[in-house]
Image (cartoon, grey):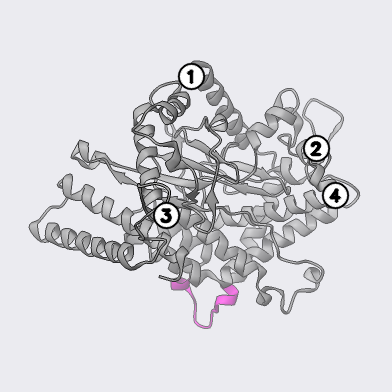
């Protein structure tokens, strides 16, 4: 097979389906012999395709030969990736319930003969098959403090995050939808026949996406459906979370007093601390425009897709000043609740702390919010609002493509993608309005109604202090600090 990238992802997607079907077979989840036979036939079909891929897929997939220097059999890149994946899962399951899990994994790699560090060197990146990962930096391996406790695996030329417990196919879907939106925003069609107020505006929203690969495994020793465990790899994107930014750059009383979650101070110091920016003539103005563009894009994307579980460890600012979201485990308005209380009543992660100058409660001095930078702060705010409206209009024009991508995966057994869940998407894209159309009522009129409602919501959120969002951020930080103190 001439296309290495296609062969690579085809192998892992086929393997994922085979693992799921095998888990169903062991768990006796099928109700009738007819269904059992059909699932066994489906698994046999996928296995045959995978074996043909490995046999006839070329050197990348299968090319066993003896190396001139060593008598050991040298296998293909996919064989080495699979061996690395099995070792990583085994180390993860054996050690993750210990407080010093990372140290145990390092020790096993250096002392346990069952695990070979050589299998972790010169490894084709599971997320980018064109890249070869070299020189594993064991001293920089770490575990993140989030609920799923993902592990950072750094090499000299790239990093991976290994995560267990979430069906990462949902993240793949969310990121794919954002890429489709970004393509629509950048297309030439978006910039034809502009309105007069958009004459000097370009709809490039500095969107940041990353690669994700779901690689679950059926742990056969359990002999039940519980043995099917969700694993996967996530690309490490350089940047800082809002939580770490506020901890480093925020003032006393953090979210309540600083007024910007520390984002303004972070952006101001970025061009000073990074020597590469001085050589590239990157100024604060470049960083602020990148922040504004990406905030507009992420605001529209989270509104349309219904991305939830938004806390300050799920929102990041990259090294170019762009803001972006991570972890798409809750989409289509699946909100998290605590004791029956809706933790996320907001549709936008957007408050005055991001976009509008205001005043501190209890203080007379003015608060400089993120957009309140320089003499063009009002101009930036107007451009931000216009970009959000324009981006939403382009999404509505591409609504059939977006809806089709969701419909194709309704039967893929994703945790939060069923036919009933698509009602939220229908509301945001105007599909629920068609059955109430009056004679002669056109889509353009429906579109104007949707855009007007979106504009009203934007103005409301941009003038709202958003105390419930701030309290959500504070509660998350307090919960994280307690877990770190107790080492849970």
Estimate how packed mark 2 is, as few (under 14), some (14 to 19) or many (20 or more) residues with alpha carbons within 10 Å. Answer: few
Q: Position of residue 178 (x, y in %)?
A: 56, 59
**Are circles 1 and 4 on residues that touch, CB within 8 Å?**
no
Of the two numbered discs 3 and 1 in the rendering, the one whose residue sits closer to the viewer: 3
Q: Was residue 96 drawn as part of the magenta stretch in this picture?
A: no
Q: SS of the residue at dot 3?
A: helix
Estimate how packed mark 1 is, as few (under 14), some (14 to 19) or many (20 or more) residues with alpha carbons within 10 Å. Answer: few
Q: Which residue was labeled with disc 4? A: 279
Q: Position of residue 99 (x, y in %)?
A: 44, 20
Q: Which mark is residue 273?
A: 2
Of the two numbered discs 1 and 2 in the rendering, the one whose residue sits closer to the viewer: 2
Among the two numbered marks 3 and 4 on one chain, the one whose residue lies closer to the N terminus:
3
Which residue is painted at 58% across and 27% down in the image? 477
Name the side, left or right, on which 95 lies relative to 173.
left
Q: Name the image quarter holding the N terminus.
A: bottom left
* Distance between the alpha carbons at the discs numbered 3 and 4: 39 Å
* Distance between the alpha carbons at the discs numbered 1 and 2: 33 Å
Q: Which residue was labeled with disc 1? A: 487
Query: Which span of residues is magenta-colored?
Result: 434-446
Of the two numbered discs 2 and 3 in the rendering, the one whose residue sits closer to the viewer: 3
Q: Which residue was labeled with disc 3? A: 77
**Residue 419 shows up from this direction:** no
Of the two numbered discs 1 and 4 in the rendering, the one whose residue sits closer to the viewer: 4
Q: SS of the residue at dot 1?
A: loop
The quarter of the picture where residue 470 lies is top right
Estimate how packed mark 3 is, as few (under 14), some (14 to 19) or many (20 or more) residues with alpha carbons within 10 Å. Answer: many
Q: Position of residue 45 (x, y in %)?
A: 22, 65
Q: Between 187 and 151, which is closer to the camera in this rendering?
A: 151
**Residue that extends furthest to the front in the rendered view of this protein:** 68
């Amino acid at each position: 097979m001439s296309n290495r990238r296609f062969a690579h992802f085809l192998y892992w997607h086929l393997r994922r389906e085979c693992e799921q079907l095998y888990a169903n077979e062991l768990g006796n989840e099928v109700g009738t012999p007819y269904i059992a036979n059909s699932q066994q036939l489906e698994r046999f079909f996928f296995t045959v395709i995978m074996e043909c891929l490995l046999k006839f897929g070329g050197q990348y997939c299968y090319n066993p030969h003896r190396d001139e220097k060593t008598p050991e059999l040298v296998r293909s890149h996919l064989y080495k990736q699979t061996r690395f994946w099995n070792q990583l899962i085994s180390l993860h399951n054996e050690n993750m319930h210990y407080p010093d899990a990372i140290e145990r994994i390092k020790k096993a790699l250096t002392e346990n003969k069952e695990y070979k560090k050589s299998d972790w060197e010169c490894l084709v990146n599971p997320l980018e098959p064109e890249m070869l990962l070299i020189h594993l930096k064991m001293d920089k391996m770490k575990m993140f403090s989030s609920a799923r406790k993902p592990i950072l695996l750094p090499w000299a030329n790239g990093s991976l995050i290994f995560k267990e417990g979430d069906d990462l196919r949902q993240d793949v879907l969310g990121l794919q939808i954002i890429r489709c939106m970004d393509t629509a925003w950048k297309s030439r069609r978006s910039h034809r026949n502009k309105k007069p107020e958009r004459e000097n505006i370009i709809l490039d929203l500095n969107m940041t996406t990353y690669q994700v690969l779901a690689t679950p495994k059926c742990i056969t020793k359990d002999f039940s459906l519980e043995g099917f465990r969700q694993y996967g790899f996530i690309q490490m994107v350089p940047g800082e979370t809002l939580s770490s930014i506020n901890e480093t750059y925020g003032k006393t009383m953090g979210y309540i007093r600083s007024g910007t979650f520390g984002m303004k101070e972070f952006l101001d110091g970025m061009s000073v601390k990074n020597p590469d920016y001085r050589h590239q003539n990157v100024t604060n103005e470049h960083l602020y425009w990148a922040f504004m563009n990406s905030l507009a894009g992420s605001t529209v994307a989270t509104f349309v897709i219904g991305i939830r579980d938004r806390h300050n460890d799920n929102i990041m600012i990259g090294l170019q000043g762009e803001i972006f979201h991570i972890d798409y485990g809750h989409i289509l308005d699946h909100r998290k609740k605590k004791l029956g209380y809706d933790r996320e009543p907001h549709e936008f992660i957007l408050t005055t702390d991001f976009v509008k100058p205001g005043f501190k409660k209890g203080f007379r001095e003015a608060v400089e919010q993120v957009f309140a930078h320089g003499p063009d702060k009002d101009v930036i705010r107007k451009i931000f609002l216009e970009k959000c409206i324009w981006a939403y209009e382009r999404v509505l024009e591409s609504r059939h493509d977006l809806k089709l991508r969701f419909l194709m995966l309704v039967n893929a057994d994703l945790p939060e993608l069923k036919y009933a869940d698509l009602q939220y998407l229908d509301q945001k894209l105007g599909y629920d309005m068609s059955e109430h159309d009056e004679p002669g009522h056109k889509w353009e009129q429906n579109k104007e109604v949707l855009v007007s409602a979106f504009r009203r919501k934007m103005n409301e959120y941009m003038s709202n202090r958003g105390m419930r969002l701030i309290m959500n951020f504070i509660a998350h930080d307090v919960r994280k600090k307690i877990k770190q103190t107790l080492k849970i």
